[in-house]
Amino acid sequence: MSLTAPPTTTIPTTTSYFVPTYNQPLDILYGATCCLCFLVGVPGNLASLTYFLYRKRDVSTVLYRIITLNDVLICLSVFPAGISFLAGRTPGFLFGNDVLLQCVGLCVGSK
């Protein structure tokens, strides 16, 4: 029984002909849809949240408050993605900011 190292496998490197292309009209459509959801969703959901804040406190009202607050957060979260798609998939003003990303990294606890 001989103890020789197994043969190594080398993967030949070739020139890749796959270049990722983006469909610019769909990016513009998606970015405009995200921005429209932000512009319509945030004021509408804030109005419904203030409506439910002044209602009597029962189970259904508390549930509606939680749902509208969740919807406000969703509408706020799609805005940076919409801006990124409208700007040619660049990081944008939020995700291109190193200070903001370091603060998010500290809050999340990434190393």
Image (cartoon, rainbow, N blue to C red):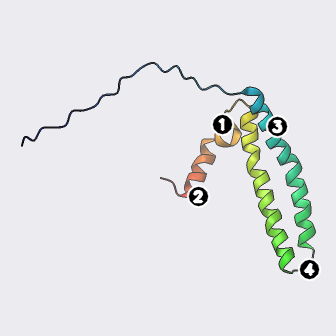
Q: CA distance from mark 3 to mark 1?
A: 16 Å
The disc labelled 4 sits on which kind of residue?
Answer: Lys
Q: Nearer the viewer, mark 1 or mark 4?
A: 4
For residue 88, above or below residue 110: above
Find disc 3 in the rendering and name its residue.
Answer: 32
Question: Going from the N terminus, do you reach mark 1 or mark 2 first?
Answer: 1
Callout 1–callout 2 Cβ contact below 8 Å: no
Q: Nearer the viewer, mark 3 or mark 1?
A: 3
Q: Nearer the viewer, residue 41 or 11?
A: 11
What is the number of the mark on residue 107? Answer: 2
Question: Going from the N terminus, do you reach mark 1 or mark 4 first?
Answer: 4
The disc labelled 3 sits on which kind of residue?
Answer: Ala
Looking at the rendered image, the quarter that the N terminus falls into is: top left
For residue 25, above or below residue 5: above
Q: Percent position (x, y) of residue 83?
A: 75, 38
Find disc 1 in the rendering and name its residue.
Answer: 91
SS state under label 4: loop
Q: CA distance from mark 1 to mark 4?
A: 44 Å
Q: Nearer the viewer, residue 12 or 70?
A: 12
Question: Going from the N terminus, do you reach mark 2 or mark 3 first?
Answer: 3
Q: Residue furthest front?
A: 1
